[in-house]
Amino acid sequence: MRAESKSYTGIDCFRMIAAVLIIAIHTSPLGTYSELGDFILTRVIARVAVPFFFMTSGFFLISRYSYKSDKFMMFLKKTALIYGAAILLYIPINIYNGYFKMENLLPNLIKDIVFDGTLYHLWYLPASLAGGALAWVLVRKSGFHRAFAVTAVLYLIGLFGDSYYGLAENVPVLGGFYTLWFQVSDYTRNGIFFAPVFFVLGGWIADAQTHIRPAVSWTMCIVMLLFMLAEGLLLHHFQVQRHDSMYFFLLPCMYFLFQALLSFRGKRHVWLRDVSLLVYSIHPMMIVVIRLAAKVLHLQTLLVENSIVHFLAVTVTSVSFSVAAAACWQRFGRRKNEQHKGADRAYIEINLDNLTHNVKVLREAMPPKCELMAVVKAQAYGHGMYEIAAHLDRIGVRAFAVATVEEGIALRRFGVRGELLILGCTPPERANELRRYDLSQTLVDYDYACRLNAQGVQVKAHIKLDTGMHRLGFWVPVESDTGKEVQKLSRVFAMKNLIINGIYTHLCVADSQDEKDILFTRQQIARFYKVVNRLKKQGIHIPKTHIQSSYGLLNYPELKCSYVRAGIALYGVLSTPDAQTKLHLNLKPVLSLKAQIVLIRKVRQGDSVGYGRDFVADRDSRIAIVSIGYADGLPRILSGRGHNVLINGQQAPIVGRVCMDQLAVDITALSNVSVGMTVTLIGRDGDREIAAPVVAEQAQSITNELLSRMGARVVVREI
Ligand SMILES: *Cc1c(COP(=O)(O)O)cnc(C)c1O
């Protein structure tokens, strides 16, 4: 969602500015005019360029939620390839410079390939590889706070081997450390000390989604740049610098610069990514070319000795060459990509803005200290567990519930934080996994609690009370006064391997407004609190309590618990179309189900369509074949009931039997329908909407079942 649905014009365009700043570093445009001016431009201001590239890569690649590493692996592969190509490209220049004649060639070659680059500017590529990989691992393993702390310390170590070296040089242990390090690499400005913190910072900005107002970020960026300038001039003046890539104020400056760039809205220019990388890679070649040309044409005074003209000549040739090369590349690349374009045959669209809206609405309906526990079992009710959970985590939901231990582990791997409750029964033998992934296990009865405790591993748990549903939970006969069962419960609280963080129950007729059902529900609630109060009387500290699921909140909003376990309502729908509830919340559906027309055919009156010849055309008809079937989650029972789908904002009935992968729709009455058009099976198209609860009812089921059975084959798209 991050990269596709927003515009990153500012970032795209700054890539070119950064590339030109790097040319400036290597050509010193002000060199012939002012030494100070040149220092300010190339040794201070232009130092934002390389960190900017690292941050951009981090922004698009490093995320605590990127559980799949393919995109990141692609980045590593591409960078390594470019690095390899660049090394080869510059071999002639290396030969000319006498590179291969140096002493200790092999160790130096290894050192250059791993850290410093075989030509001065190439260090950026191995630094990208090492810095990116380090940042990725740190963020995935320990989250942004720790990753930032670690990489910031690395940066600090780097700083004292770079701009602040003069201060560290003569300190006994420090000086020794840096002397040792400079045997390994010529600088500290590399993939270990310099790059990682910017990768982490870029990813952090992307994940945190906190946007600073443009005016504030620009002001802060300029203030930090001025501080950096003062820092650079001071260090320069006192001749502390060994090298001049790293400054203390570079970090805050980059943070605010990046935030400022994010405030630009407009068209994306992704192609500038390739152009800027090309400019970066080939400009040293252009420096050589310009020098050669100047020699041949006897124009050295103008083209080489005049620093501004030299800089401009290198910039113009590098940029022109890169634009031309990128254009060729894109043509070739585009042809390759087209094979993957075109609509997916059957897909779910999830609207994350609606999900955010529902979270807000539910929270407003909850009592003040109550927290939302998002129920994301069964692929988040068929919506795609990764997409839903990552978004909820990002917007600050800190409690989740799932049905199985596998789902719990998956959520942790997706990067989800906070309380994570398993509602079902996990084999006690898997206690180790519960602990390793910091999952809370539901204790379903006394015997189960004993077995889990006996595993010898400390595990977090919530006690479930059976207050009348008679599914999972401790049954506590509160009417009798034996107190035996309550004794058992208090024993569970004392078990040394169980950390009891919650106690809860589940209501079984909370969706009904029937008088009898309301009475039953009130009994369930009363029973729950009776047990809780008895435990309290025994001096037991009562952990977090929760009773309500979606309908529990909608019909019994007055309860004051620690959590509401919301499932179906979170997804913006109710179980049935005519649900009567006490609260009427303005929830918005998150999911749409869509497919496409793959074929339009004419059938004559009397022809049949599909299996069993159930549908026979009573007139000459046009039939659209749609690429979705019951294996994708559209119930077969909808066959032959005149159930409608939407095409082009118009209704059209399904005819014949729904197949495993296809279905047929009668479009005789529709105008302007063509192959490739989108068919909406659940969701909105123009003025019309097919609501999930209506489809569920037609299929003799409830929305919960319909959604959670969405096939594994459908693609999930975020909008
Ligand atoms: C599935 C489930 C929920 C969520 O129910 P909704 O009606 O979808 O809100 C809550 N609690 C338990 C125990 C569940 O199994």
Image (cartoon, rainbow, N blue to C red):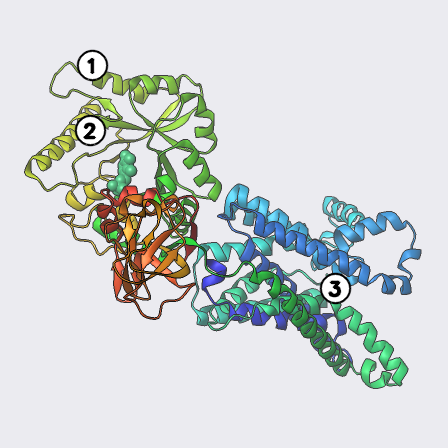
Q: CA distance from mark 2 to mark 1?
A: 21 Å
Mark 3: secondary structure? loop
Queried on whether the Cβ of the residue with tag 2 lies below 8 angstroms from ligand 1, the answer reads no
N-term-proximal mark, 2 vs 1: 2
Q: Is residue 18 left or right of residue 30?
A: left
Mark 1: secondary structure? helix
Looking at the picture, does residue 599 appear above or below residue 288? above
Q: Quadrant of the N terminus?
A: bottom left
Q: Residue 19: percent from the left, percent from the top?
A: 66, 70
* Disc 1: which residue: 484
Q: Is residue 39 visible?
A: no
Q: CA distance from mark 2 to mark 3?
A: 78 Å
Q: Quadrant of residue 598?
A: bottom left
Looking at the picture, does residue 115 appear above or below residue 307? above
Q: CA distance from mark 1 to mark 3?
A: 81 Å
Q: Residues within 10 Å of mark 2 (few under 14, many from 20)?
A: some
Q: Residue 426: percent from the left, percent from the top?
A: 38, 26
Q: Is residue 518 left or right of residue 701?
A: left
N-term-proximal mark, 1 vs 3: 3
The amino acid at mark 2 is: Met
Q: Is residue 543 left or right of residue 529?
A: right
* Disc 3: which residue: 239
Closer to the camera in the image, 643 or 315:
643
Closer to the camera in the image, 601 or 626:
601
Q: Quadrant of residue 665?
A: bottom left
Closer to the camera in the image, 403 or 419:
403
* Disc 2: which residue: 469
Residue found at x 58% / y 69%: 225
